[in-house]
Amino acid sequence: MILGCIADDFTGATDLANTLTRRGMHTVQTIGIPQGAAPAADAVVVALKSRTIPAAEAVAQSLAACRWLKAHGARQIFFKYCSTFDSRDQGNIGPVADALLDELGSRFTIACPAFPENGRTIYLGHLFVGGDLLSDSSMRNHPLTPMRDANLVRVLGRQTPHKVGLVPYRTVKQGAPAIAGAFATLEAEGVRHAIVDAVEDRDLENIGAASSALPLITGGSGVAIGLPASYRMARLIPKREGAEPLARVGGPGVVLSGSCSAATLGQVERFAAMHPAIAIDPEALADKPEDTVSALLGWAREKLTSGPALIYASAPPEKVAAVQARFGREKAGEMIEHAIAALATGLAAEGVRRFVIAGGETSGAVVSALKVEALEIGPQIAPGVPACLSYGSPRYALALKSGNFGGPDFFAEALEALT
Ligand code: ADP
């Protein structure tokens, strides 16, 4: 293993595994820390569900993953979080990055969530989502991690007692040596975390090359773009093509959506216009959880005989706010994740093997409930979202989609890709 990765959610993990695979690294994603032997791969991405849990737990899980990866040969550690820097003032990006630095005996790392292919760019430390500042994007209304400040130096500064600095675009555009020089200067000034500007893939390639000596890199999947090339240059990995097609599992396909992100809402609307679709009613769920889930399963059983179907909790911000006001933010999220996980296991028990899941936390809940331990990464469906096939038995074909990823027809495209 060359690169050991720790991802703070499941869709983020697949996004990173997708990037590494496409650039020629043989990558395996594991769900949590593997119990058995290390998978044979150039890179292993350990998927945690640590984005919104208490910071101390996120730190403990991330440290355990780091120790496992180091013990299995990882030369470099990558802490992956969302390209919209999803976090709260109490963490968990800052506390986890600080703990990993201590664990690795290192004093400096970068923080770079840029993902230009998906419209996430950073300029003068400010994160943009498409043409909007993060704080003006739909992320300001995220159910779990509302992002209301686009200045990442400030956002990360609230999550760590250490100094946060910036490598500005004028330095980044000068290329890898200038970026590496800026890292050295910042480290000498006592900066422990450097936000690095990036607006296009070439910037990320240069940042990747400049980061090759850092024991820890933190960021979105974009900053991993440059890593395979620098490992190849160092002759650590052979030249390889991108992803291979995955084995076929067959049978009916289901879309389960617990994401309330703007892109998902559009995808739900588009898919529901042409296919059977049913909404999960949070009130009914709170009142009679088991009856509600079994009614939804009954509905799906009938619909799946003639084609794919969608079950969704996804709702616009005002509806989410009303549900949260009634049940509490965490409770509402948990209750719905629980229900979607129960739907997935119920459907799996009836033989469904092809699942498209929308939502990072939602995907985490489903994959855990299905007892998936590791994923083989296949061809990309949309930027950041590959087709995946679980190891073990039975094998599930899965598309795990982070909230704002994918075009309007993503659900239909994903079902077609999951054979
Ligand atoms: P994303 O990838 O878009 O951030 P997640 O699955 O990570 O999606 O997070 C969405 C959260 O919102 C989950 O905890 C989910 O259970 C919760 N949720 C889904 N639908 C609703 C709803 N109608 N009301 C309140 N919360 C909801």
Image: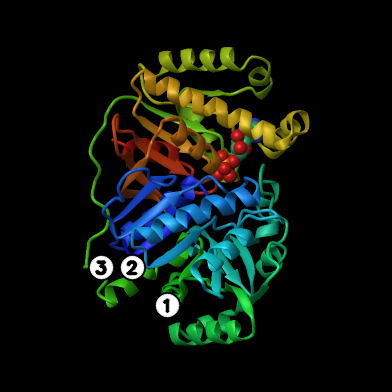
Give whichever of discs 3 and 2 has the lower sequence position: 2
Tell me which corner region of the image, top left, top right, bottom left or bottom right, holds residue 241: bottom left
Left or right: residue 158 versus residue 123 is: right
**Is 284 on the left-hand or right-hand side of 224?**
right
| Position of the C terminus by quadrant | top left
User: Is residue 410 among what the camera can see?
Assistant: yes
The alpha-carbon separation of the residues under discs 3 and 2 comes to: 8 Å
Q: Amino acid at mark 3?
A: Ile
Kindly check if marks 3 and 1 are in contact, taking CB atoms under 8 A apart as contact: no
| Of 75 and 142, the residue lying toward us | 75
Residue contact at pointers 3 and 2, CB within 8 angstroms:
yes
| Residue ID at (27%, 71%) | 236
Mark nearer the N terminus (3 vs 1): 1
* Residue appearing at x 48%, y 83% in the figure: 180
- Find ligand 1 in the image and state its quadrant: top right
Q: Quadrant of residue 317?
A: top right
Residue where numbered disc 1 is placed: 213
Location of mark 2 (residue): 228
Q: Which mark is residue 99?
A: none
- Residue 243 is left or right of residue 275, and the answer is left
Left or right side of 162 for 26: left
Q: Amino acid at mark 2?
A: Pro
Image coordinates for residue 28, horizontal then vertical, percent: 33, 51
